[in-house]
Amino acid sequence: MIRWLEKIRIRSQMLFHRRREIQRLDAELAFHLEQQIAENIAAGMNSEEAGYAARRAFGSLE
């Protein structure tokens, strides 16, 4: 029952607050991308390689 209610809550947020939810998801994706870049740099990559590898691992963020 709770899972069903959670799905309704999420869908209503996307319906009524779509722009805010899209911005929230964009921010979350950017955070994870930056984290992956930082991990790649810590593993010895230069910043350009680290960014390219992170974007390749995440795929298209469009």
Image (tube, rainbow, N blue to C red):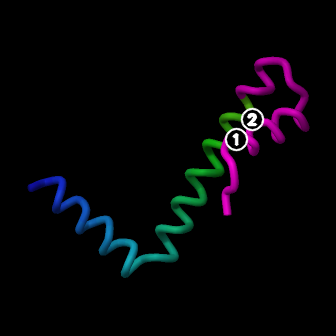
Q: Residue at 37% across / 79% down in the picture?
A: 15
Quadrant the N terminus occupies: bottom left
Viewer-nearest residue: 35 or 5: 5
Q: Which label was assigned to residue 44?
A: none
Residue at horizontal 17%, vertical 62%? 5
Q: Is residue 59 above or below residue 16?
A: above
Total numbered badges shown on the rendered structure: 2
Look at label 2 and name its amino acid: Ile
Could you tell whether 50 is left or right of 16 in the image? right
Residue 30 lies, in percent from the top left, at 65, 51
Q: Nearer the viewer, residue 19 or 57?
A: 57
Q: Is residue 10 magenta?
A: no
Image position, residue 29 (x, y; %): 60, 51
Farthest bottom residue?
16
Amino acid tagged 1:
Glu
Residue 34: numbered disc: 1
The quadrant in which residue 50 appears is top right
Q: Which mark is residue 37?
A: 2
What residue do we see at 61% from left, 42% from top? 32
Q: Which residues are magenta?
A: 39-62
Asked whether the residues under the numbered discs 1 and 2 touch, taking CB atoms below 8 Å apart as contact, a structural biologist would say: yes
Please name the residue shown 46% across and 76% down the image: 18
Determine if the magenta segment contains residue 46: yes
Q: Main secondary structure of the magenta part?
A: helix
Q: Residues within 10 Å of mark 2 (few under 14, many from 20)?
A: many
Quarter of image, res 40: top right
Report x, y in % for residue 14. 39, 73
- Give the secondary structure at mark 1: helix
Direction from residue 53 to residue 16 in the image, left or right: left
Q: Residue furthest left?
A: 1
